[in-house]
Image (spheres, rainbow, N blue to C red):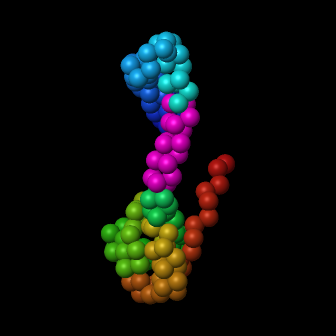
Amino acid sequence: MNPSFIFNIVVTIVIAVIMYFLLPVITADISNSLAASVGVLIGGIFTPLVSNLINSSTNESDTSEEVATLYVGNLPYRANEQAVQEYFEQQGKVVSVRLMKDRRTGKRKGYGFVEMDAKGANRAIKHLNDSSFQERTLKVRLAKDKVEG
C-alpha cells in the first residue's frame, strides 16, 4: 500500500475518534454515531488536502536533487574511480563513478559513467567534453538509457 494512503486512513480515524468525543460535549443533542460520521466526513475531506500540501513541499526539495548520468569516453586505462570523481567534482556534486572493466581480463575498457547533480552534469558536459585528462581527450555526454534485452 502507498504510505500516503495509509497516512490518510490513520489521520481520518484519529479525526473521527476526536469528533466522536468532542461533538457530543459541544452540542448535547447529537448522538455519538452521528458525531463519528461527521468526524469521518471531515477527516476524509481534510486529510487529503493536508497530505497534498506535505507531498508538494517535499517534492519541491526533491527536484533540486535531480541526478543525471554521464557517459565518459576515451578514459585512460590507468585512471581509477577516485581520480575521475575528483576531476568531475570541479563541476558539481558527484553521486557515483563506475568505470567499465572487461569481465574476462579485469582490465579497464576506457569508458565509464558518472552520476552527478543535473546542474553539475550540464557544466561537466560543457567544460569537460574534449578536455585533457591524464593525457587523453575525454568525451563527455549524457548517457543513453540502458536497453533491456
Is 51 covered by the magenta stretch?
yes
Q: Position of residue 119 (x, y in %)?
A: 48, 73
Residue 9, placed above or below residue 114: above
Residue 2 or 75: which is nearer the viewer? Answer: 2
Q: Position of residue 97 (x, y in %)?
A: 41, 64
Q: Magenta segment, which residues? A: 43-59
Looking at the image, which residue is at 37% across and 75% down?
89
Residue 103 showing in the rendered view: no
Residue 122 or 9: which is nearer the viewer? Answer: 9
Per the picture, the main secondary structure of the magenta-coloured stretch is helix
Is 102 covered by the magenta stretch?
no
Looking at the image, which residue is at 61% across and 57% down?
146
Residue 91 or 82: which is nearer the viewer? Answer: 91
Residue 69, placed above or below residue 135: above
Residue 18 shown left or right of residue 139 in the figure: left
Residue 91, placed above or below residue 118: below
Looking at the image, which residue is at 57% across and 70% down?
142
Residue 31, placed above or below residue 7: above
Looking at the image, which residue is at 48% across and 80% down?
123
Residue 124 showing in the rendered view: yes
Q: Position of residue 38 (x, y in %)?
A: 53, 23
How many labels were placed on the picture? 0
Residue 120 or 25: which is nearer the viewer? Answer: 25
Q: Position of residue 115 (x, y in %)?
A: 46, 64
